[in-house]
């Protein structure tokens, strides 16, 4: 008999963004988990295999593709209709968005009284309306022919014309499927920002970049990992869920030289004469002259 290696249990890999900053605030996987299988007590989230149902909600919420050994749920569909019958795992909005973009799904077939799926479609339609996409319809296949002998064992109707598939998971996959949409709003408080560049260096998606002439914010690239918030000392950058057309912003900056320590720095104001570090030393401890 050929040797078959056992499947690895699901877990959180080192790609988790919380490994990159001590104050990382990303909790997307724990928030998405309906059973409390993911805890955030440690710096890196821990997945309790005993509690995990394998629903895959955390996969579609993760901004860094950090969930290992877990696959999205396989679902049935026919033409432009997704089947919600006989499937106990209700998809997240991100998963439904992937079906919308990659398979052209515009309807879902549900048994009457399936309120959980209905709520998921309503939440999806709110997002689709905001980004100018056609909303989904709910249909009830009352007259559908059912193979009762097969239904006895599988608990759902059998239709030979149906196909099945899984969607690519993760916030990066959603971004790739809707490149013209910003799924997160990135705002910078120019009064508090010192233009230290920490957010630019740490951002894995290059949604924030700092050069000698401007601070560029490309919210369409943001996956909501919150790494920039965790590393920002003055708490001048803020991320929140959003759904709107993407419009990159350029905030002009000016190259300056500190009058105290002679260090080159950039500022939003051309009249600034002291670098951020010297401004913090109110007693002139960094002054060279």
Image: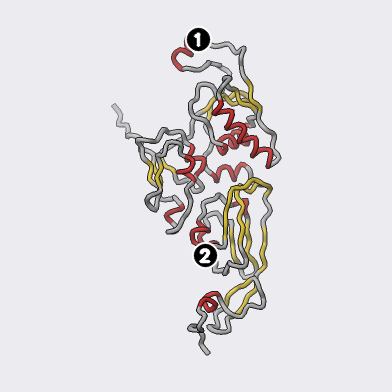
| Position in image of residue 276 (x %, y %) | 55, 74
Tell me which residue sits at (48%, 34%) in the image. 72
Tell me which residue sits at (54%, 28%) in the image. 116
Task: Point out which mark residue 284 bears.
Answer: none
Q: Which residue is mark 2?
A: 198
| Position in image of residue 51 (x %, y %) | 37, 35
Give the answer, above or below, for where 200 lies relative to 169. Answer: below
Q: Quadrant of the N terminus?
A: top left
Tell me which residue sits at (58%, 22%) in the image. 110
Give the answer, above or below, for where 56 lies relative to 23. Answer: above
Asked if residue 30 lies left or right of residue 161, the reply is: left
Tell me which residue sits at (57%, 20%) in the image. 111
Closer to the camera in the image, 219 or 160: 219
Give the answer, above or below, for where 94 lies relative to 205. Answer: above
**Residue that lies at the very extreme toward the bottom in this rendered image:** 289
Badge count? 2
Asked if residue 65 lies left or right of residue 48, the reply is: right
Callout 2 environment at 10 Å: few (<14), some (14 to 19), or many (20+)?
Answer: some
In terms of secondary structure, where does tag 2 sit? helix
Callout 1 environment at 10 Å: few (<14), some (14 to 19), or many (20+)?
Answer: few
Closer to the camera in the image, 4 or 137: 137
In terms of secondary structure, where does tag 1 sit? helix
Q: Which of the two discs, 1 and 2, labels the residue nearer the N terminus? A: 1
Asked if residue 33 lies left or right of residue 94, the reply is: left
Q: Are marks 1 and 2 in contact (CB under 8 Å)?
A: no
| Position in image of residue 8 (x %, y %) | 35, 38
| Position in image of residue 58 (x %, y %) | 47, 40
Q: Measure the alpha-carbon separation of dots 1 and 2.
A: 62 Å
Q: Which residue is mark 1?
A: 148
């Amino acid at each position: 008999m050929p040797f078959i290696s056992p499947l690895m249990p699901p877990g959180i890999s080192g790609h988790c963004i919380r490994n990159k900053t001590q104050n990382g605030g990303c909790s997307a996987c724990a928030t998405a988990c309906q059973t409390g299988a993911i805890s955030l007590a440690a710096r890196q989230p821990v997945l309790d295999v005993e509690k995990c149902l394998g629903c895959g909600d955390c996969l579609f919420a993760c901004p860094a593709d950090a969930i290992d050994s877990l696959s999205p749920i396989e679902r049935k569909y026919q033409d432009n209709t997704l089947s919600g019958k006989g499937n106990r795992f209700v998809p997240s909005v991100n998963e439904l968005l992937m079906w919308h973009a990659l398979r052209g799904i515009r309807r879902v077939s549900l048994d009457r009284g399936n309120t959980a799926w209905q709520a998921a479609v309503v939440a999806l339609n709110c997002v689709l309306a905001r980004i100018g996409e056609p909303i989904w319809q709910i249909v009830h296949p009352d007259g559908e022919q059912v193979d009762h002998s097969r239904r006895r064992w599988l608990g759902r109707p059998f239709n030979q014309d149906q196909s099945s598939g899984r969607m690519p998971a993760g916030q990066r996959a959603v971004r790739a499927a809707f490149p013209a949409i910003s799924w997160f709003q990135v705002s910078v408080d120019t009064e508090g920002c010192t233009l230290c560049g920490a957010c630019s260096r740490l951002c894995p998606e290059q949604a924030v970049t700092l050069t000698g002439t401007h601070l560029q914010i490309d919210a369409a690239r943001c996956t909501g990992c919150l790494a920039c918030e965790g590393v920002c000392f003055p708490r001048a950058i803020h991320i929140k869920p959003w759904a709107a057309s993407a419009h990159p912003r350029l905030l002009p900056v000016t190259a300056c030289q500190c009058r105290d320590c002679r260090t080159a720095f950039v500022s939003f104001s051309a009249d600034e004469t002291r670098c951020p570090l010297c401004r913090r030393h109110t007693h002139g401890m960094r002054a060279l002259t």
